[in-house]
Amino acid sequence: MNATFEPRLHRAAPDELAGRVIAITGAGDGIGRAVAVTCAAHGAEVVLLGRTVGKLEKVYDEIVAAGGVAPIIAPLDLEKATAHEYDAIAAAIGTRYGRLDGLLHNASLLGDLSPIEHYDVPLFTRVLHVNVTAAFALTQVLLAQLRASPDASVVFTSSSVGRRGRAYWGAYAVSKFAIEGLSQVLADELAGTTAVRVNAINPGATRTAMRRAAYPAEDPARLAMPADITAAYVFLLGPASKGMTGQSVDAQAPR
Ligand code: NDP
């Protein structure tokens, strides 16, 4: 790979993800939805993980209407999921495909924007659970399927506030720092002995419900649409990033 290459500028071949099975959390809305549709458009079989089944069904319909391979819908509420539910998803993927080639941890909870001094302790715990503990648990339960792939890629979703702390971003920022750490630890553990690579991605400012909640006064017309930022995701989830692990990349040019 060229040292100056930017994943966000990757131009995927039409069938770049053909034959790959890719699971995506939070696939029913925002960035997760756009990445799911894009991966399917490039030939992947996608596993749509999310908590609102109606949204997942719409993504399913969109993929099938566009001629993509029919996805699996896998309802999973990351706040409430039991060990049994995690096991059932791993078993379903194992039975149907016998492997997993890509895993995108995209779902997350914003929590409150408030000073640490006043941050609600139960909310802090919920945000850390959904954004970090659930991603860890899902990765752990799917590792056997990832190891069964000849070229698997795990991608964690970071944020600019997961690289440099910013006032009032509270549990969300802490969770994104933790995600960068989880990504690096796992990448280091799997390097050399497996074909599983692990990287993080920062989507950058993108027009979604979460962004609206964080910046209610912002003009959304200034923001990228989810469908505009998928190139780096396809790069990381597909064969183009083979050999790259332990990195954290940007889906958009820094502003
Ligand atoms: P959205 O709010 O549009 O989507 C978030 C997704 O996460 C939804 O599909 C939501 O499900 C899902 N989700 C939330 N809680 C749970 C849960 N308990 N169990 C399962 N799924 C859950 O956000 P974005 O698309 O903007 O965010 C995607 C990722 O990108 C996040 O990790 C976010 O932190 C990150 N990010 C986004 C930026 C932006 O500007 N948009 C900037 C930097 C990072 P449901 O639809 O059912 O609510």
Image (tube, rainbow, N blue to C red):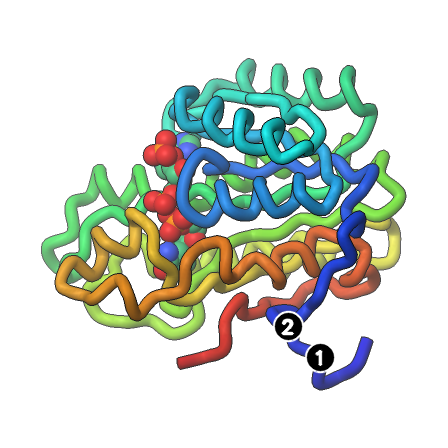
Q: Nearer the viewer, residue 212 or 245?
A: 212
Q: Residue at x 32, y 54 (%)?
A: 172
Asked if residue 2 lies left or right of residue 204, the reply is right
Q: Secondary structure at mark 1?
A: loop
The answer to whether residue 240 is above or below residue 82 is below
**Res. 120 image quadrant:** top left
Going by the numbered disc 2, the residue's amino acid type is Leu
- x, y percent for residue 104: 59, 45
Asked if residue 252 lies left or right of residue 110, the reply is right
Whether pointer 1 and pointer 2 mark residues with C-beta atoms closer than 8 Å, the reply is yes
**Res. 85 image quadrant:** top right
The answer to whether residue 189 is above or below residue 131 is below
- x, y percent for residue 216: 16, 58
Specify whether tag 2 is near ligand 1 (CB below 8 Å): no
Asked if residue 206 lies left or right of residue 50, the reply is left
Does residue 194 appear anywhere in the picture?
A: yes
Quarter of the rendered structure image containing ligand 1: top left
Alpha carbon separation for disc pair 1 and 2: 8 Å
Q: Quadrant of the N terminus?
A: bottom right
Q: Quadrant of the C terminus?
A: bottom left
Q: In this figure, which residue is indicated by the disc labeled 1? A: 5
Binning the other alpha carbons within 10 Å of mark 2 as few (below 14), some (14 to 19) or many (20 upward) gives some
